[in-house]
Image (cartoon, rainbow, N blue to C red):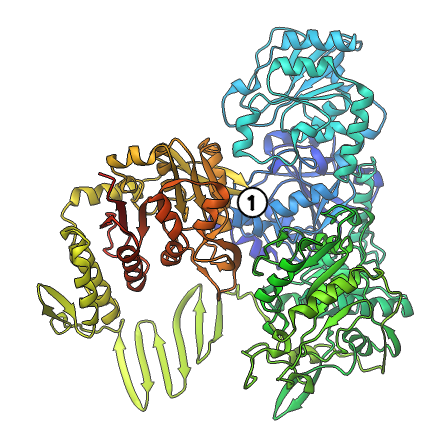
Amino acid sequence: MNKIKKYLFKIFRFLPLSKNKIVFIAHSASRFDCNPKAIFEELLQSNAQIKCIWILNKKLHHEYQDKYPNVLFVEPNSIKTFFHLSTCRVFINNQIHIYYKKMGFSKRPDQLYLQTWHGSFGMKHVPISDNIDTVHEACTDMDYWITNSFFESNVYKNTFDKNAKFIEIGHARSDCLFSSCNKNIYSYYNLDPDKKIVLYAPTKREDSFNNFELDFKKLKFILEKKFQVNFVILIRTHRNLKFDFKNDNIIDAFDYPDVMELVKECDVLISDYSSIICDFALTYKPIFIYAKDYDTFILTSKLYHDYSKLPFGLSKNFNELENCIANFDYDTYKQKLKEWLENVGCIEDGKAGKKISNLIIQFINKDKNINLYTTNQITPYIAKIMGFKNIYFTFRNIGDQIIMMRSLELLHQKTKQIFLIGTTLPDLWKEVKFVKVINLKEIKPHIYQKEQFDLMTSYGIKPIFLTQESFNKEKGKYIRTYGPSHIVANVCSKLGLEGDIAVDLHFPLSEKEKTFGRFVSENRKQIAIISGGLQRYKTYPFGKLQQVVDELKDRYDFIQIGTKKDLPLRGALDLREKLTLREVASTLYNSDLFVGGIGGLMHMANAVGCPSVVLYSEAEPNYMVNYYNNINVFPKNNICLKCTEGKHCPWTSPCKAESQKYSCIDNIRIEDVIDAINKRIYMPRNLNKTTIYNVEAKKVFGLEEQKKVGFSFQSLNNKYIYLDRKKEKDKKVLQLLIFGLKPVSILWKKRYYKLRIFNIHLSFDKFKFKFRIGREKEDIDNANLTYRIGNSEWIKGYEKYYNQFLKLQKYFDKKSLELLHYIFQIKLLSKKTNKQYIESEYFDNKKRLILRNELIGLKHSVGNLFLEGQPIDVYMYGGFITLIQQTNSYALLHECFIKGSYFSYIKSNDIIDIGIGNGLSSFYLSKYTDKKLYCFEASNKVYDLFLESVKLNNKQEKIMSYNLAIGSKKQSVYVSNRIDNGNKTSLSIQSHSVFMDTIDNLVEELCIKPKMINIWVNGDEYDCLIGMFSTIKIFRPILHINISYSAEILFRVIDFAINSLDNYNFKIRKTIEPHIVQELFLIATPKELK
C-alpha cells in the first residue's frame, strides 16, 4: 500500500489548489494543541472564509468533532490527507514532516508552509533522530519558521536549515500567558483554590529514572516554608515514566491536554533542560533548575547557555536545590530574568496569533500589501502577489552584492520604489528596507537553478542581471571589459541614473549588531585584516603580510577575518569562519582600520564606515574601487600593465605576464604598507569627503548581460528520462538517463569518438574502428617484468633501488629486510602494470588476519550523540570511546607495537602523538605514561571530534591536544581536512588552513619531556623528523613512524634515521592489514633501551 501511496502526491499535484483550504497538524498528528491549535482558534475568531482540515490520529477525532463541526478531521496516513496536503493553500505544522517527505510530498510554489515548531528558544541542542538528509530536504519545503527571538531563529537555522526564512513575531501558543488568569487546572484536578502549584517538568531522557528522583515531601515543605503558602506538586514527565502517588498533594500531570495552561496557572517551575523553562520565564514566576546529571549530561549533549550564569540557579543535588529556594530573592531574580530575555531577543507580546492569522488571510486573499512583519525575504509567489515585475541580481560575491545594494539605494532615493532582488546571501540584505529578497538556489557556484527562474518568468517577473562591467564583442566572443567609471557608478548608469554619483557604500546594521565586534580594549587600536583574496591578482604574498603583522603587532591588535582557505597570520586573533557575515560587518564597524586587498570585505569596510589600507592591485584601474576614506598602496615597478588596458585580468587562468608573474600585487613593498597603516590609523575615522563620479545613463538590460558573463542555468535533473551533458578539459560526454540508469553514452574529443550501448563499445580512434563487449582487459606477462640480482627479484627499469636496498642490510634485521623488499617489489610491480597484478599471500599467520578482519568488521557503534545538530556515531574499542570508526589494527590488535621493555623507559616521561586519526592510538599510548600525552592534529574536523572523545574517556587531565600541523618550520599551511586518516598538509591545495610548527619549538614552549614520539601524517613524516632533530638528540625518544605513503617518503625517512640517529636500533614492522602496502612502520629505539 505504501508503494502505491508514494505516487499519490505526484498525481495530486496536477489538481488545482483550493482557494481557502488550510491544513493543520501538531506533533505528527498525535495531539490537538500547541501553536497550530492557537493559530487555528485565532482564525476561527476572525470569521474569515476558510476551510480547515486537521490531520489527527483517529482515536482523538471524537474528542473534537462535536466542538468543531465545520472542521474536517483526517487520519495521518489516509488518502484524504495526501489529497488535502497536495491541494491546500496553507499548511501549518509544528514538527518536521518526515513521513510525508518519504512518501513524496513536495510543497507547491503557490502554497504557504508555516513551521511553528513546538518549543521555545531552547536550553539544550535540538536532537535530530531522523536521517539528516531527509530532514534537510524536508526543510526546503518550509516557507517560514515562526519564532519569538533572533536567538531561536539562529538555533533553527544552525540545526535544520541554513537557508531558512524566519518571521520573528512570537508563538501563538504563548499568547494565553498575557491574558487574564483562569482556573482550568484547578477544576480539572479538583484542587483547593487557596493552594499554589509547583510544576516539576524534566526533559525527556533515554536513561534511568534515577535522574528524575526527588524527595517531593521534603520539597513541598521547603517551598511552603519559603513562600508561606500551601503547595500541591504537579509532575509532568515523559510518557514512559509513570508515577504512582497516593498523596493528594503530588499529582502526575502527564495526561493534561495543554501544557501552556500548566505554564500559565502553575506558580513555581522546577526543571532541568526542557524548553518549558523558556515558556515559563515569560510569566516572571520563580524557576529553579535541578539537574542531578548535569556533569555527565554536558558530555554528550550541547547546552545553549552557561547554566552557572542563568537567573534560575543550578542545583546538582537536593541540598543545593534547598539552598537555592531558601535564598531566592524575587527582585534580583526579576531583574536578571529581564536581562536574559533581552539578551536572547525575546519579543513575545501576546499578539502572535493575531499577526499570523492576518498574514494567512492576506495570503489567501492575494493582498498586495501582505505584511511579513520582521523579514524582507519572500517567495516567488508572494512576489507575484505584491506585483513585482523585475528581479535584480548580480554576482554571488560580497562586494558585488553591496555594490548593487548601494546602487539600488540611490535609485530608491530618487524614485521611492521598492525593489525585488535575488541573492544567495539573503542575510546580507536583512536590514535593507527598500527591497524584498528571494533566496536564489544554486546548483553550484554561479550556476542557478533553472526552474526557479522559469517560475518567476511564468509569474511575469523579468530577471535583470546587474554588473559594472562592459562586454565587447571581439572575434565572435564577448570580452569582459572594465567599466569606464567607479564600480558603483557603472552599475548606477545601467539603472538609468546619471550625473554625479556618491559611490561611498552603506551597509545598515541594527543597534544591537553595532554593540558586537570590539575584541580589544578601547586604549588599543583594533585592525581587521584578511590574508586571502578571491583571485590571485588580489592576494598579497602571505610572507610579506606576515612581516607587516610581525612589525606592528606590539603597537596594534590584529583581528583576522575571512575564510579557512586564508592562511592564518601569527600574532592575530583568528576569527576566520567563526563569524557570520553580519558579525564580520559588526567587527569592521568596531575596528579602527581594515587591511586587505581589493575584494568584498574592503567594500564592506567602506559600507560600515571603517577606513582601509587597500593593497591595490594594478590589475584593476585605480578609479575602479577607489574610496576617498581609504589609503591605497600601489606596487612599485609593476612590469605587467596589460590588464589596465581595459580588458579583464585573466584571473580564470595563470598570470600571462612574460617576465614577472603577478607583479601587479606582489611588487607592493612591505615598508609602504606599514607606513600607510601608521598614517591612516591616526587620521579621523571619517574624512568627510564624499567620493563622487559623474556618469551617463545607459539602457537597463535583462539577461542579455548575464549570458555574456558566462553565467548559466541548470535544471535539477529530477526527471525520469533526460539527457545529461558533461564537458571536461579535453572531452565531452552525452548520456541518456532512464530512472537513474545510463544505457547509452557518447564520448568525443579530438580525433576520438566512442559509443556505448549497455555493455557494447564501439570506438573510432585515429582512423581505426574498435569493437568490444564488456570491460577492456590487458594481459600481463609477469615473467618479463623481473629478473634476479643477487638473492632478490627486481623489476626491470628499477635497478637503481637495488643499491639503496643493499645499504640497509647492516642496519635492519632479516625480517625487516624481507618485509621491505617484498613490499617495495609489490609497489613497483603495481606501478609498472597499472595495478593489474595478482598479489600473493604474505602472511603465514592466517588466524591473526582473520581476527583482525573480525575486529575491524564488528559493529562497534554503541550509540550516538549530537554535535552541532548532527547525530554522530559513538564507537567502543578496547574500552575506549571514539567518534570515528577504526579502519586499521595498529592500536586495536598490535597495541601500537609497544613492547614490555618500553614501560620503565616511558613511564615517568611524556609521549608525543602526531596525527591523531580516530584517536584510538592516542588513548592506547596514554596508558604507558604517568605524565602527559601531547597530541597534534592538523585537521580541525578530526581535532574537534577528538576533543569530544577525550571528554567521553575522561582523559582531559592526561591528554593535551592542539590543532596544529607539525613540520620542519613555522609557517601557515593548508590541510585536506577529511574525517579519516588521510589528511595531508600542503602549500598548494587551498582548502582548510592551519598553523604549522616544529616539535623542537613546541617541546621548548610547552616544557615537554618526551620519551616516545608516534608519527602518522600521510607523507609529511620526513618534515616532522627534520623539525624534531634537537628533541631527538636531547631526549632520545622511541620513534614509531608510519612510512606507508610512498616509496620516496619511505627511503627519505629511513635515510634520515640511519644517518642522523646515533646509537639507535632499527626495525620495520607492518600491521596485519590485508593489503601488503598498508600500515608500514619504522621503529627506532635507543640502544640503551634493552
Q: Is residue 599 in view from this perspective?
A: no
Residue drawn at x 60%, y 6% is 246
Towards the viewer: 552 or 950: 552
760 left or right of 943 in image: left
Q: Viewer-proximal residue, 348 or 818?
A: 818
Read off the residue under disc 1. Answer: 98
Q: Identify which residue is drawn at 84% across, 66% down.
A: 409
Give the x, y percent position of residue 545. Answer: 62, 64
Q: Is residue 578 above or below residue 384?
A: above
Above or below for 749 versus 123: below
In the structure shown, which secondary structural element does the residue marked by tag 1 occupy? helix
Residue 986 location, x and y as percent? 46, 62
Q: Which three-letter amino acid code belongs to the residue tagged 1?
A: Ile
Q: Quadrant of the C terminus?
A: top left
Name the foreground residue: 504 vs 312: 504
Residue farthest toward the bottom in the current orientation of the protein:
475
Q: Is residue 107 visible?
A: yes
Depth order, front residue of 52/805: 805
